[in-house]
Image (tube, rainbow, N blue to C red):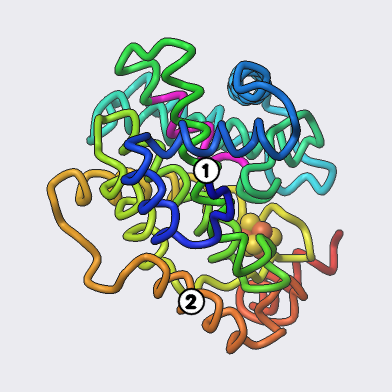
Amino acid sequence: MDFSINTFEKLLSICESENKKIYEIMQEKEAFDFDIDVENVRNRVAKNIEAMKSAIKNGMTSKEKSYSGLCGDDCAKLQERYKKESPLFGKIYEKITTYALATMEENLRMNKIVACPTAGSCGIVPAVITALSEEKGLNKEEEINALITAGTVGYVISAKVAMAGAVAGCQAECGVASAMSAAAAAQILGGNERQKINAAILALKNILGLTCDPVGGLVEIPCVKRNVFLAIHAITGAELSLAGIESKIPPDEIVDAMVQTGQLMSPLLKETSQGGLAITKNGILISSKL
Ligand code: SF4
């Protein structure tokens, strides 16, 4: 099999010619690249899923603030609200928002998380996969299939651009995480391979231009809450795609647009904390107290 998968078009053509799903192709590629068997690949992915779930569990029971003291108790506040009021969009919405916050707060406490694709965007993929898994009753193998699908989306995008706010803004961190999650959601919800990629690309397309402007140079403001928003954004991508709504711009062209947008973005908005939120009056005030 030709394993040089550097575009979505290529990925889909391999899926079609081999009559296999995205996760099947990628797990075979990983096995080939690392000279291990597919079972070994899946065991490694299973360990990541366990680590994601641990981060969610730990994050939901902690109110410990970050070293800066800026963040750390929002997940507790959200859970308190959900005890009193049912979330407008139901249990899956409740779980996704809570889990994304829990994971990101574990990250800023410097506890163990899974960077997916980065630490600053680590709340999105775990929130979507875990919430959907619990609500849809997935088994371990189905969770692994979902995470490999998500990882494949990140892998293909990373062939063209580094996953870093310093390179292409937050579209390359939380934006890519949202795209990865949309594909995972489509995998869980029974989409075909084209729908999984289309779900991802709809999510990516609708966050193009997202800047990276962390207050005080810390991965806290706006990063923590941004994970919550973009986890929900992923579900919209999956729902639209599963309804048969397709992006009129092909997937690889959207990745190209993302790369170009990142190149055009001012360095002031690429993790330097010299623009956007970071230099608002209160952004500077917060920064001066750190
Ligand atoms: S705003 Fe910047 S630092 Fe924060 S998650 Fe996005 S890319 Fe990472």
Q: Which residue is mark 2?
A: 256
Disc 1 marks which amino acid?
Answer: Met
Q: Quadrant of residue 22?
A: top left
Q: Quadrant of the C terminus?
A: bottom right
| Type of secondary structure dominating the magenta stretch | helix
Nearest to N terminus: mark 2 or mark 1: 1
Which residue is pictured at 78% across the width and 35% down the height? 109
Vertical placement of 197 versus 98: above or below? below
User: Which residue was labeled with disc 1?
Assistant: 1
User: Residue 141 placed where, x, y %?
Assistant: 47, 15
Q: Is residue 163 above or below residue 97?
A: below
Task: Judge whether 10 appears above or below 98 on screen.
Answer: below
Spatial CA span between label 2 and label 1: 26 Å
For the point 22% across and 44% down, the residue is: 239
Nearest to the observer: residue 193 or residue 88: 193
The reply, left or right, for residue 157 in relation to residue 110 is left
Q: Residue furthest front?
A: 1
Residue depicted at 61% across the width and 78% down the height: 276
Q: Residues within 10 Å of mark 1 (few under 14, many from 20)?
A: few
Q: Which residues are magenta?
A: 122-131
Magenta stretch encompasses residue 79: no
What is the quadrant of residue 264 in the picture? bottom right
Tell me where residue 231 sits by quadrant: top left
Q: Secondary structure at mark 2?
A: helix
Element on which disc 1 rests: loop
What amino acid does circle 2 point to?
A: Asp
**Residue 69 locus on image (x, y percent):** 78, 44
Q: Position of residue 195 (x, y in %)?
A: 26, 47
